Image (cartoon, grey):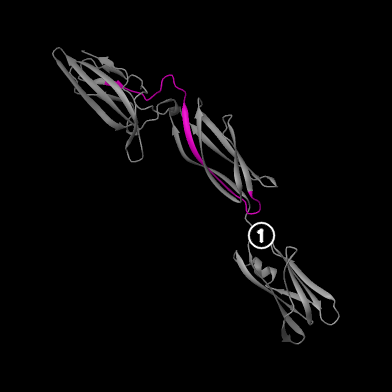
Amino acid sequence: MSVTISPTAATINGASKPYLAQFTAVVDFQPFRYYWYVNGARVYSGVTYTNLGGGNYRIDGPTRQISAAPITIRAAVIDASDGSSEQAEFTTADQRTAATTSLSLLSQKDGVPIVDGESVPMTPVAAAVPGQSQIDFRWSKGAAGESPISRVVVRVAMHNEANNIDEFQVNWGDGNVETHDVPNLNRITRDLHHTYTGVTGLYTMQVNPSEAGTGSGPSASLAVQISADATGWYAQQYRIEERRNQPGFRQISQVGWRDISDSTGTFTMYSKRSGFSYYHSLQLREVDVTGRPIRTSAISGEVNTGPW
């Protein structure tokens, strides 16, 4: 006596998932009644069959959509002649992908945020060049008296086909640890914000997920370099305000706005008249990706040069 289930475990393992299977079985005895089980639970039963001839009979089974997770199929058939039972069973392969966790840096803003109209840049430094019609000029976006700041946005992505994820912990590497509850899903993506304050150098963050009922899942880490620029104002553009004085004469002009990335902060101003006094001050601003101003600082203190 034999029971042969179709499709076979090999057929299911080789099929793309999810796979819709219509189960049947061929027996070499006349069935009286039969039962089908999926993962130990009875899901189908019947008494009808198809006579294939030659002492073989086909019985129908359930239709099931099969994922990459293993599944156990069993068919139990009662012989019509003597009431004995014969069965067949197989379990498909576990084809679920391995659990993964990743961390990626979406953005990093090194520098102290400008408070619109209130933050005061450092006063520039200027020196006239004797015998020349020029002034050597230096400015800095340094934020005197402020702690360095770096604002980061990271993406946490976790995937586990075998177990749901119920929480994850993020250690930012600077002494701050956060625990995030998630709604027991097997795929999670979260964007997280963090501000590093008063530190520069290399910091490594780590994320550790917890899977429902199984403990910890795979962890991931990401190193973030906080540069010395974090000690300056977070700004993309600058301008220089110039005032030229002489008895009975006054003029105000502006140099900028110019992109900070295109400037070294040290340059020479030409075509200056040695008989004048020049007064210069600095202003910084933050702009968005389109160049639209977001926040503009107050004007710095004024540096005086000349006459020479």
Q: Quadrant of residue 259?
A: top left
Determine the residue positioned at 57% across, 48% down: 188
Image quadrant containing the C terminus: top left
The answer to whether residue 278 of the structure is visible from this angle is yes
Q: As drawn, is 130 to the left or to the right of 83? A: left
Q: Determine which residue is flagged by label 1.
A: 69
Q: Quadrant of residue 110?
A: top left
Determine the residue positioned at 36% across, 40% down: 289
Depth check, front residue: 233 or 116: 116
Determine the residue positioned at 46% across, 25% down: 148
- Vertical side of 292 occupied by 255: above or below: above
Image quadrant containing the N terminus: bottom right
Total labels: the figure holds 1
Magenta span: 136-164
The answer to whether residue 274 of the structure is visible from this angle is no
Determine the residue positioned at 22% across, 19% down: 243
Q: Amino acid at mark 1?
A: Ala
Q: Residue 168: x and y, percent? A: 61, 41
- Vertical side of 161 occupied by 74: above or below: below
Q: Residue 187: x and y, percent? A: 58, 51
- Which element is circle 1 on? loop
Circle 1 packing at 10 Å, graded few (<14), some (14-19), many (20+), is: some
Please check the rendered image and state whether residue 265 is part of the magenta-colored stretch, yes or no: no
Q: As drawn, is 114 to the left or to the right of 45? A: left
Q: Residue 222: x and y, percent? A: 55, 39
Q: Residue 231: x and y, percent? A: 44, 25
Please check the rendered image and state whether residue 163 is part of the magenta-colored stretch, yes or no: yes
